[in-house]
Amino acid sequence: MAKIAVGGKTQSRVLARGDGWTVSDVVCTSGPDDRPFEERHADFSIAIVAAGTFEYRSAAGRELMTPGSLMLGSAGQSFECGHEHGVGDRCVAFWYAPAYFERLAADAGARGTAPQFGGLRLPPLRALSPLVARACAGIGGPLGVPWEEIGVKLAAQAVQLSGGRPPRADCAAPGAVARVTAAVRRIERDADEAHSLRSLAYEARLSPYHFLRTFERITGVTPHQYVLRVRLRRAATALATDLGKVVDVALASGFGDLSNFNRAFRAEFGVSPRAYRRRAG
């Protein structure tokens, strides 16, 4: 999953490894002036985008990678990553040796002896939120993160969820990708602000109708879903890594009141904020 660029820099810090798997914290500082290089996945790779944006390209198509999404790489697949519309990204990257991944895929219900992902990316889906939040919290969290368990569950869900998502020939016109990238980075930077469809569309210089269609086509989720999941991921990280009051976490994450936060959190993660904190501890 390493991304190498002239001028930019990639640093990879191994978080944990075992028999057939490795997980690393990968930070890239490449930007629009850095030329991407073609690389090849030696192993199967699933990278959770924790921050930043980049374009992921292969012969199968291209996708805009945004926080909360999963970058999928099959063993032997050539690819390149570019940062034409913004500087830098950070990923929690899992690598699986082919034989190990084949066993996981078979257990998850994949057919055939040579499993392949059904696409290049999974968008920020509700089904992935618990694992994404746990992994992102684990980057700088306390020791004892169950990385092997997270990796096994992540592989199973990626195989199951990507099965019905064939690769696309193209993501969108460069101008559309640039506008959506700017909107994504704006949301990530100021997640606690009120982001209406109208205000985001205005900043993108598109009508609300065209912005909604373009954003959903490129990211895989609507602007409302994206804003909500950014706030909930941040809240989950705060609950797992500090001892602040739940109401303070809710307000700091952009929720207007505790009751709305509790409902949204339970719908996303399946448990209350307090129960989530207990399990994370």
Image (cartoon, rainbow, N blue to C red):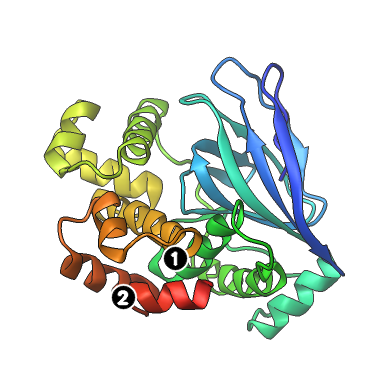
Q: What's the amino acid at mark 1?
A: Ser
Residue pointed to by mark 2: 266
Task: Give me the disc on residue 120.
Answer: none
- Residue shown at the point (39%, 73%) measured from the top left: 269
Q: Is residue 231 visible?
A: yes
Binning the other alpha carbons within 10 Å of mark 1 as few (below 14), some (14 to 19) or many (20 upward) gives some
- Residue shown at the point (62%, 35%) measured from the top left: 81
Task: Of the two numbered discs 1 and 2 on the same chain, state the one appearing first in sequence.
Answer: 1
Label 1 sits on a secondary structure element that is: helix
Label 2 sits on a secondary structure element that is: helix
Of residues 274 and 159, the one nearer the viewer is 274
Q: From what the image shows, is residue 103 above or below residue 38?
A: below
Of residues 234 and 45, the one nearer the viewer is 234
- Residue shown at the point (77%, 60%) measured from the top left: 16
Task: Give me the disc on residue 129.
Answer: 1
Q: Quadrant of residue 144?
A: bottom right
